[in-house]
Image (cartoon, rainbow, N blue to C red):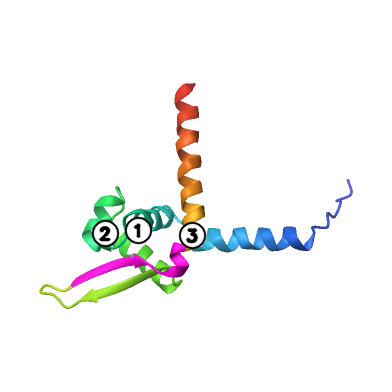
Amino acid sequence: MEKRKIELSESCRKSIQGIKDTQDLLSGKWKAAIVGALFYNGKFRFMDLSRHVVGVAPKVLSKELKDLEMNHLVKRTVLDTMPITVEYELTSQGKSLHRIIEAMGEWGIKYRKSLLKK
């Protein structure tokens, strides 16, 4: 059987690359939930964020926040308090994900409802 080569348009290739880039940035079980919590609630201290992203272990949360910070989606601020306090918030680049985060939330709500109807 001969394999047929399908030629994708330039706009299709760019769109697929953009989707892949977004998936890479938000990959893993917790990154989208972390971005969502920060989007809907603004700044969070580490422990407050861990309470809002239910189920994430502190070590994993720390790693995910470092990844998000490295990719310029989250800003980490160390406050001059005793003991030292760290706050996290979305950068302008992180805030630009708002349509994606809202769409994911809306889709997830509809999907859950459709499953519960069956």
Q: Position of residue 113 (x, y in %)?
A: 46, 29
Local crowd size for mark 3, using a 10 Å CA cut-off: few (<14), some (14–19), many (≥20): some
6 relative position to 85: left or right:
right
Q: Position of residue 114 (x, y in %)?
A: 50, 28
Q: Residue at the location (31% across, 53% down)? A: 56
Viewer-closest of 63 and 81: 81
Q: Residue at the location (51% across, 54% down)? A: 99
Query: Mark 1 and mark 2 in contact (Cβ < 8 Å)?
Result: no
Find disc 3 in the rendering and name its residue: 97
What's drawn in magenta, residue-wise?
85-95
11 relative position to 21: left or right:
right
Find disc 2 in the rendering and name its residue: 58
Q: Residue at the location (62% across, 62% down)? A: 18
Seen in the picture, residue 34 relative to 62 is either above or below; the reply is above
Seen in the picture, residue 114 relative to 72 is either above or below; the reply is above
Which is closer to the viewer, label 2 or label 1? 1
Furthest residue toward right? 2
- SS of the residue at dot 2? helix
In primary-sequence order, the first of circles 2 and 1 is 1
In primary-sequence order, the first of circles 3 and 1 is 1
Mark 3: amino acid:
Leu
Mark 2: amino acid:
Pro
Numbered tag placed on residue 46 in the rendering: none
Numbered tag placed on residue 38 in the rendering: 1
